[in-house]
């Protein structure tokens, strides 16, 4: 009887030990898979980061060409001469030489049948712009930005590419040549890591923009590549962001790719055996460890489970953060508890050593983190009652705001873990500084909205701002004005003095009106102003008289004592009637015409019946 009991006990123990061994083996195998996935995720992140670096490198030239094209379109609509367009290209080349850190030779164009160059380069007689790749590429894109195939600059022995855009006339083209040193350096630097066989930037047509093997730069893999290169280029034409495997020359490769804009791909080529070689040793070591841990099966079980969870959590954090955030906090949504992953003094001040009740404190956080202009927007974005729903279909949501120090920050909620129903239960609350990027964007935006000669807003931006004010129901006074007998100034003193008169009118308007008023140049000597809040003639006259005084006393010694005067038409926009910008403009224009009959700093207001006094 005792022997039978002993046999049963032994059998049960054996079964338990075997079950434990199988269970732990499964755990070790899952660790092996997780380690493999972490390696894949790490390379995906590296590819994505490299793609973002290249995209950022090309963003400034693309924006520069778009802005230059828009401005030339505006100048063309005013009948600008080749000389005016050429001077604009020279001015833009000087500006972008500093903004783009000397990575460009400047802005040039084929405009109205003539080649114009902002850097001063004079083409030889045989140079035909319409037959150059930069021109043909822009025409082919029909108004979209064209990134032309790289070419070798024989003067500098460096690769360059053209960024071009066709204008609305279907014949004129604006272009900029960009040095690809930065992109090539990135590919070379990435490939210096031992695991990478090659790193390259390639477009969807198979043209190699940059490559760790510099001999391949400018090569077309689809047309001139070997069998492996042709197959790679073919796959990239239809591949989505991620990775795939290929065979070539008896070697297995893992290919990681991420898109750059609409036409380029960042590609990492890795030797599969080298990349995953360490995993085999890890798995073997884990199996050897199994023999030892079986002796203390229960202890090891809990230990391995704990480590497994920590490994998965670390993988989620590394994947989500990508090492770009200045602040990162993990939040458990059901409990509202927080854990600081990466912090700073600002975070300590906001949390005040209290890492609980996230859901209840979101509105307080929004108030203490943001400037007044961003506060309501951030309160809505951080509303905990809608947060889970907003994260139900996406892994992250973002909002840009200005903090209490006037810096631009991007706040992001990232889903770190979901429950069985797919709802977010754990998120990462992260902050990324984007202040420098926003300032660069604002500088380019302001440049595109500004009249080059006078520094006030140009016609397009001025009208756009006024339409927005009207749409928001803001009341105010709208003025149209031009200089009296301006043609005689040009005829008597020359166009250079005429330009100084135009600048003086703009300066007088800027000095007479508030910073918040919309002052812009319509073209020639014509200007317009919208002054919000001025809705009666008495107040309007005070401001207009201030403008007349400024203009009369404008320092213009070139005129030899001649006084510049202006004729002004004024109209009011109020919320007591339906109105449009066109109607407002027409009434003010009629007033200007009436003032011309009087001359000499005269203003004509509309009355309630839209007649003039």
Image: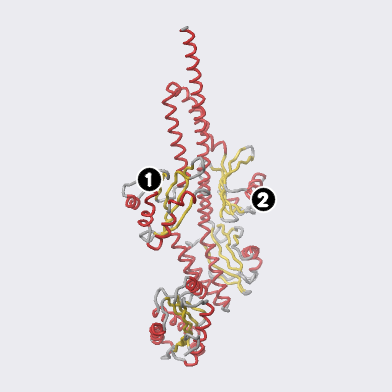
- The residue pinned by badge 1 equals 340
Q: Quadrant of residue 205?
A: bottom right
Is the C-beta separation of discs 2 and 1 under 8 Å? no
- Residue 252 visible? The answer is yes
Mark carried by residue 233 = none
Does 565 sit left or right of 265 as displayed?
Answer: left
Work out whether 341 lies above or below 35: below
Q: Position of residue 331 (x, y in %)?
A: 41, 45
Which type of secondary structure does the marked residue at label 1 adopt?
A: strand
Say how many tags the image has. Answer: 2
Q: Position of residue 107 (x, y in %)?
A: 54, 67
Q: Nearer the viewer, residue 550 or 610?
A: 610
Give the class, few, some or many, for how many residues have Cα within 10 Å of label 2's Cα (few <14, many ≥20). some
Residue at image position (52%, 86%) is 590
Which residue extends farthest front? 576
Question: Viewer-nearest of labels 2 and 1?
Answer: 1
Q: Nearer the viewer, residue 574 or 397?
A: 574
Which type of secondary structure does the marked residue at label 2 adopt?
A: helix
Residue at image position (42%, 57%) is 378
Does 146 sit left or right of 8 as displayed?
Answer: right
- Residue 554 visible? The answer is no
Q: Position of residue 380 (x, y in %)?
A: 43, 57
Give the class, few, some or many, for how many residues have Cα within 10 Å of label 1's Cα (few <14, many ≥20). some
Q: Nearer the viewer, residue 409 or 454?
A: 409
Q: Position of residue 323 (x, y in %)?
A: 44, 47
Q: CA distance from mark 2 to mark 1?
A: 50 Å
Color encoding of the figure: secondary structure
Task: Answer with mark 2 or mark 1, whichever residue precedes in sequence.
Answer: 2
- The residue pinned by badge 2 equals 222
């Amino acid at each position: 009887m005792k022997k039978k009991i002993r046999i049963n006990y032994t059998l049960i123990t054996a079964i338990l030990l075997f079950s434990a061994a199988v269970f732990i083996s499964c755990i070790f195998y899952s660790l092996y898979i997780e380690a493999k996935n972490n390696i894949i995720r790490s390379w995906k992140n590296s590819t994505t980061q490299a793609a973002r670096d290249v995209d950022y490198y090309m963003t400034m030239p693309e924006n520069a060409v778009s802005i230059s094209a828009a401005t030339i379109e505006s100048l063309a609509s005013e009948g600008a001469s080749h000389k005016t367009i050429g001077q604009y290209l020279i001015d833009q080349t000087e500006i972008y030489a500093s903004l783009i850190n000397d990575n460009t030779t400047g802005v040039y164009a084929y405009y109205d049948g003539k080649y114009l160059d902002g850097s001063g380069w004079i083409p030889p007689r045989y140079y035909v712009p319409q037959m150059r790749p930069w021109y043909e590429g822009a025409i082919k894109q029909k108004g979209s930005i064209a990134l032309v195939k790289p070419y070798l600059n024989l003067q500098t022995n460096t690769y360059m590419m053209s960024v071009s855009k066709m204008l609305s006339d279907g014949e004129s083209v604006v272009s900029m040549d960009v040095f690809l040193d930065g992109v090539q350096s990135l590919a070379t630097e990435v490939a210096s890591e031992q695991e990478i066989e090659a790193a390259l930037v390639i477009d969807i047509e198979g043209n190699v923009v940059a490559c760790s093997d510099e001999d391949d730069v400018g090569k077309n893999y689809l047309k001139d590549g070997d069998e492996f290169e042709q197959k790679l280029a073919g796959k990239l034409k239809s591949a989505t962001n991620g990775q795939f495997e290929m065979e070539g020359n008896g070697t297995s490769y893992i290919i990681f790719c991420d898109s750059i804009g609409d036409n380029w791909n960042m590609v990492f080529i890795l030797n599969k055996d080298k990349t995953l070689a360490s995993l085999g040793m890890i798995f073997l070591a884990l199996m050897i460890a199994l023999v030892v841990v079986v002796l203390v099966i229960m202890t090891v079980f809990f230990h391995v489970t704990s480590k497994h969870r920590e490994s998965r959590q670390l993988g989620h954090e590394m994947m989500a953060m990508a090492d770009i955030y200045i602040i990162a906090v993990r939040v458990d949504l059901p409990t509202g508890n927080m854990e600081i992953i990466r912090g700073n003094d600002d975070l300590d001040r906001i949390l005040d050593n209290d890492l609980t009740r996230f859901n209840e404190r979101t509105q307080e956080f929004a108030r203490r983190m943001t400037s007044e202009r961003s506060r309501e927007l951030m309160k809505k974005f951080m509303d905990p009652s809608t947060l889970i729903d907003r994260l139900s279909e996406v892994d992250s949501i973002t909002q840009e705001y200005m903090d209490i120090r006037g810096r631009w920050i991007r706040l992001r909620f990232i889903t770190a873990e979901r429950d069985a129903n797919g709802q977010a239960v754990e998120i990462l609350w992260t902050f990324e500084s984007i202040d420098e990027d926003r300032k660069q964007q604002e500088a380019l935006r302001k440049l595109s909205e500004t009249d080059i000669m006078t520094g006030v807003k140009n016609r397009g931006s001025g009208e756009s701002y006024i339409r927005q004010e009207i749409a928001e129901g803001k009341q105010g006074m709208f003025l149209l004005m031009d200089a009296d007998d301006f043609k005689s100034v040009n005829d008597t003193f020359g166009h250079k003095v005429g330009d100084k008169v135009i600048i003086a009118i703009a300066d007088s308007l800027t000095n007479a009106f508030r910073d918040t008023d919309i002052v812009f140049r319509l073209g020639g000597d014509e200007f317009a102003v919208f002054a919000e809040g001025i809705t009666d003639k008495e107040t309007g006259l005070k401001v207009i008289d201030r403008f007349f005084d400024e203009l009369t006393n404008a320092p213009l010694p070139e005129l030899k004592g001649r006084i510049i005067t202006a004729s002004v038409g004024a109209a009011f926009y109020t919320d007591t009637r339906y109105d449009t910008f066109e109607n407002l403009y027409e009434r003010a224009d009629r007033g200007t015409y009436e003032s011309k009959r009087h001359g000499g700093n005269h203003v004509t207001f509309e009355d309630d019946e839209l007649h003039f006094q």
